Image (spheres, rainbow, N blue to C red):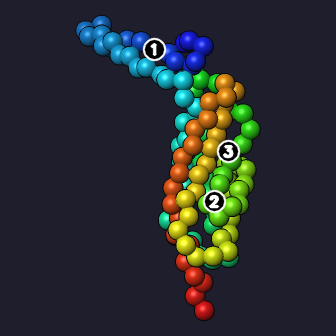
């Protein structure tokens, strides 16, 4: 691994009959964000739940994921809740950072609907 967090991994697997050599390159990017859950629809003034699992590969995770909900509000945590004040379409972003200072951001859209009377 170099100072930027780039690496090449090479390994072999197999049996006494056959050996397969495999490799993968790893760039110096931030954590991998898995199990990202952003609802496709939400209702005005009703709390919606958002979640993500950041997985480190080059360095440990630093702090909790940070969420931006597209309406000027934010939250911190792997599982958070947020209620929108107005209907509309909002871009939700979540960012996680590792100890090397590498950050990964994922984004999804949520459509917020008016509350039914």
Q: Position of residue 64 (x, y in %)?
A: 72, 42
Residue at 73% from the left image edge and 50% from the top image edge = 76
Q: Which residue is mark 3?
A: 65
Label 2 crowd bin: few (<14), some (14–19), many (20+), radius 10 Å: many
Give the quadrant of residue 2: top right
Q: Which secondary structure, mark 1?
A: strand
Label 1 near label 3: C-beta < 8 Å? no
Residue 114, can we see it? yes
Work out whether mark 2 precedes mark 1 in sequence or the reverse, and give the earlier one: 1
62 relative to 93, above or below:
above
Badge 1 density bin: few <14, some 14–19, many ≥20, Cα 10 Å: few
Q: Mark on residue 20? A: none
As drawn, 46 above or below 33: below
Q: Decide which of 90, 34 is in the foreground and name it.
A: 90
Tell me if residue 87 comes above or below residue 105 in the rendering: below
Q: Quadrant of residue 55?
A: top right
Looking at the image, which residue sits at the far bottom?
Answer: 117
Q: Quadrant of the N terminus?
A: top right
Q: CA distance from mark 2 to mark 1?
A: 36 Å
Whole-number angstrom distance, CA of label 3 to CA of label 1: 28 Å
Quadrant (top left, top right, bottom left, bottom right) of the C terminus: bottom right
Taking the image as shown, residue 18 lies to the left or right of residue 64, namely left
Distance, label 2 to label 3, CA atoms, is 13 Å
Q: Residue at coordinates 65% horizontally, 54% vertically from top-left?
A: 68
Residue topped by disc 1: 8
Q: Position of residue 108 (x, y in %)?
A: 51, 55
Could you classify mark 3 by the number of other residues whose Cα lies within 10 Å: few (under 14), some (14-19), or many (20 or more)?
Answer: many
Question: Residue 51: image x %, image y %?
Answer: 61, 53
Residue 69 is tagged as: 2
Circle 3: element type? strand
């Amino acid at each position: 691994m170099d100072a930027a967090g780039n690496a090449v991994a090479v390994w072999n697997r197999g049996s006494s009959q056959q050996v397969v050599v495999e490799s993968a390159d790893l760039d110096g990017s931030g954590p991998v964000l898995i199990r990202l859950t952003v609802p496709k629809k939400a209702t005005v003034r009703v709390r919606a739940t958002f979640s993500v699992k950041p997985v480190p590969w080059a360095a440990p995770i630093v702090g909790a994921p940070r969420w931006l909900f597209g309406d000027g509000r934010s939250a911190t945590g792997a599982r958070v809740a947020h209620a929108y004040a107005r209907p509309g379409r909002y871009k939700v972003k979540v960012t996680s950072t590792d100890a090397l200072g590498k950050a990964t951001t994922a984004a999804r859209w949520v459509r917020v609907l008016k509350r039914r009377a």
